Amino acid sequence: MDLRRLLAVAALVVAVCAATLTAAVEGFDILQILGKHDEFSQFCKLLNETHLAGDINRDRTITVLAVANGDMGHLTGGHYSLGTLRHILELHVVADYYDDKKLKQLSHAATAASTLFQRSGFAPGMAGYVNITQHRGGKVSFIVDDAADTVKPVTYVKQIESHRYDYSVLQVSGVLSSPEAEAPVAPPAPVNLTDILSKKYCKSFAGLLAADAKVFDTLNGTKDTALTVFCPVDAAVAAFMPKFKNLTAKAKTAILLYHAVPDYYSMQFLKSNKGKVTTLATTSVAKKDYTYEAESKEDTVTLDTTVVTSTIQATVRDDDPLAVYAVSKFLQPKELFKSKTADLAPAPAPEAGPKKKKKKPSSASAASAPSDESADGPSADDSSDDAADKAAAAPLSLFARWVTMTVALAIALAA
């Protein structure tokens, strides 16, 4: 094998390893990690209530400084609003990677690390930086740069979990203190969801939401904490109405909730990230997935439900905690309509025991009509356990295909 072919094989191997590592990191979930340890239940609860957990999961190259229940102190006393609690917790999220080994390599030196509070825009000067210092005997301490002279540093206790150079979760002995982070945060101004959705792009969709009390109440109750709505433009609603009218009441509610996400997604985030979007239908309809893939290509954000692919046409509102985007098509979930990839899927294995034959619908009617699930509700085949098994098996299957492809190409290049 000459040098050029050897380099080509090496490049393929590196690409496979990088893709595999990326797939592994995409599964990072701070609530799941801390959920394995009962002693961090209160810290975990606050990450969830302040919606900081979602920001942590979407970030990369990050270190979370977790605090055990017995060391939470004043954070659990109800003294702070959710906005202030979020700022305090942001001090515990370092925008850099530190694990046990890296902390010990500081060699009695100190370093200043930026936190999510500093990146939030609410921290003036050096208020959002944490000083990390290694002392004699190997003890490592953390203290916020603007902390009062009477504030004692918190110390490193142990490493909980890490994925080298991507994320690390460490335990510290107490809550970091900062007068800037602990300052009162004014509650957000009240938002009239009806007024926002009644603007030129979303008038027809706003009418559908207003006609379903359950949907409207759900969205209205979520808008002040974290909500993203993808509203189909009026032309898209008009084109979809013949199908919408044929849905059951339950399916209509599900498909409207399918257009709302219980999290705030800024346009900047949507353009810089790719992944599965969990909707309000996911959490409201039992044993159903109701998710879709969000992706950005050439500065255009697309939402792929596997039934249709819709693009964001305009921003109606993008102001934390609420975002509203006008999209080109009515989002149709695979739970109610035939997926574009259904014909490519392998045939299911035969079940034990006799089964009655059912009349096979024509391809035209199958593509346009709602599935039986829209009328009969959830089926056992869509259980959360099956979904979890498939999700767990996907990385392994993907890795096997990469390895097979790499070996085959390596042999071909070496020939």
Image (cartoon, rainbow, N blue to C red):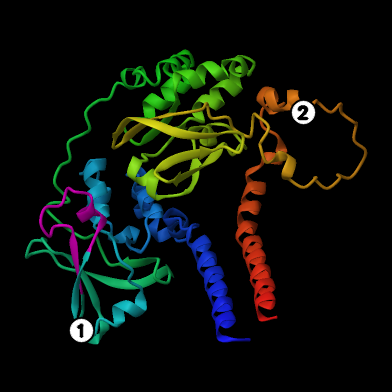
Nearer to the camera, 91 or 395: 395
Q: In the shown orientation, is residue 97 left or right of residue 343?
A: left
> Which is closer to the viewer, label 2 or label 1?
2
Q: Which label's residue is closer to the chain start, 2 or 1? A: 1
> What amino acid is found at the position of numbered circle 1 in the picture?
His
Inspect this view and state whether residue 9 appears. yes
Image location of residue 227, percent across then percent down: 38, 34
Q: Nearer the viewer, residue 50 or 294?
A: 294
Picture residue at 34% right of the left edge, 67% below the top: 171
Residue 282 to residue 153: above or below: above
On residue 108, the disc is 1
The quadrant of the image that shows the N terminus is bottom right
Q: Position of residue 195 (x, y in %)?
A: 31, 18
Q: Which residue is mark 2?
A: 363
Q: Which region of the structure is painted magenta?
A: 114-132
Q: Could you say which quadrant of the image residue 218 lies in?
A: top left
Q: Is residue 349 left or right of residue 35?
A: right
Disc 2 residue crowd, few under 14, some 14–19, many 20+, Cα 10 Å: few
> What residue is drawn where x is 64% and y is 15%?
246
Element under label 2?
A: helix
Give the percent coordinates (x, y) of residue 55: 35, 50
x and y, in percent, of residue 16 in the image: 56, 69
What amino acid is labelled 2 in the image? Ser
Instruction: Reply yes or no: does residue 121 show up in magenta.
Output: yes
